[in-house]
Amino acid sequence: MGKYILQRLGQILVTLFVFQTLLFVILTAMPGDVTNRMLTNPDIPPEVRERTRQALGLDDPVLVQYGRWFQNFITGNLGVSYSEYPTPVIEILEERIPRTMVLFLAATIVQFVVGFSMGRALAWQRGGFFEYGSTIVGVTLYTVFTPWFALMMIFIFGARLHWLPLGKFLTPILWRKVDIPGMSDSLTKANYVFTRMLWTATAAFVIWLIMAYFTRNLSHTKRNRTRLIATVIILAVSIGGWAMVDIGPLAWDITKHMILPIVTLTLVGFAGTMLMTRQTMLETLREDYIQTARAKGLPEKLVRDKHAARNALLPVFTGLIISLPSVISGGIITETVFSWPGMGLTLLNATTQEDIPLVMGTLSFIGVLSLLAHLVADITYAFLDPRIRYS
């Protein structure tokens, strides 16, 4: 396993070098630069534009710009944003990534759980109204025009029923009323609360994984009951802990703004996981070891969950791991419709404003995560499927 990981890391470094080179070539080949916006302003003389290009290094030869960019990338310096000058790109990414992770990681997990559970049920109970109805609804939502559907969700649950906020990621009036020591503006408070919400969710997830590991040898019924009780306790402690602190109302305000985007993303995307799970489950149910398990007289629920669903989980879970980098990039359409200031909206604004350093920094970060996600997926194979071993 160790030798395989080293080989994969070597491949990742080579792929990353090629990716960075292609990214630089494609972006620098675009006509114009950020100083073109100065041409439309008659109050800015041409010499100021030239001095700006020299200060930003845009008049250097392409090879010099590439060498400077690659050297800075290796040292962790992603440059300075043109549109938010002189803010470093890394600071912008540190600010926007938690917002996207809180929203899209939650949506991805909910979407995966719903899709896998329904796909497992569809494969096990075929031919009924539940299968046909779920498939038709899932495929319809999966192929729906996402911006229109998101706007309809906002119109129904926000504008008409007034159950949820219309958009954005916080309520400014509420955030002005709550004081956090050392923080005066809402943006700093939002980053502070976002980060702690993310750490709380991470800690709860790690605790749940530890609990799941130590309960793996229990009987099927006891294991499910224990995990359900432990999940309820973990959620109650997490929510109760936030309710007891002063910034609890701020966390609840963020949560309310997250509900509508998460529900929208889940409804649009769960069908992909559902149909993939159904297909892999149907293939698994034809395997000989499933017939052997049934011949031993094992309960049908145990055969479904432990033998069939566990092996069908491998390609579905792999797709989930590989899709995680898109969580960081965020959905440009979703973040635009819901006015959620995350990575997707940042990438869109940077592209329209010709902020090349911010675009390259964002895409580089996504590229690194994509390569690491493939490595994690390969390693996870050996744990999910005992038939797979790396030598």
Image: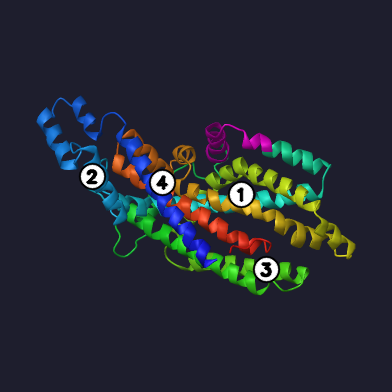
Q: Could you give the CA–CA distance between mark 3 and mark 2, rounded to whole angstroms?
A: 50 Å
Q: What stretch is highlighted in magenta?
A: 139-159
Q: Is mark 2 on a helix, strand or loop?
A: loop
Q: Name the residue under label 3.
A: 227
**Residue type highlighted by circle 2:** Tyr
Ranked by sequence position, the earlier of labels 3 and 2 is 2
Name the spot of residue 172 as percent of width and height, x first.
38, 49
Q: Could you give the CA–CA distance between mark 1 and mark 3, rounded to whole angstroms?
A: 20 Å
Residue 126 placement: quadrant:
top right
Q: Could you give the CA–CA distance between mark 4 and mark 3, rounded to whole angstroms?
A: 34 Å
Label annotation for residue 111: 1
User: Viewed as shown, does residue 380 lie left or right of 288?
Assistant: left
> Could one spot residue 252 in this view of the protein?
yes
Task: Give the quarter of the figure containing the C terminus.
Answer: bottom right
Q: Name the residue under label 4.
A: 343
Ranked by sequence position, the earlier of labels 1 and 2 is 2
Q: Looking at the image, is 296 positioned above or below residue 148?
A: below
Q: Which colour scheme is used?
A: rainbow
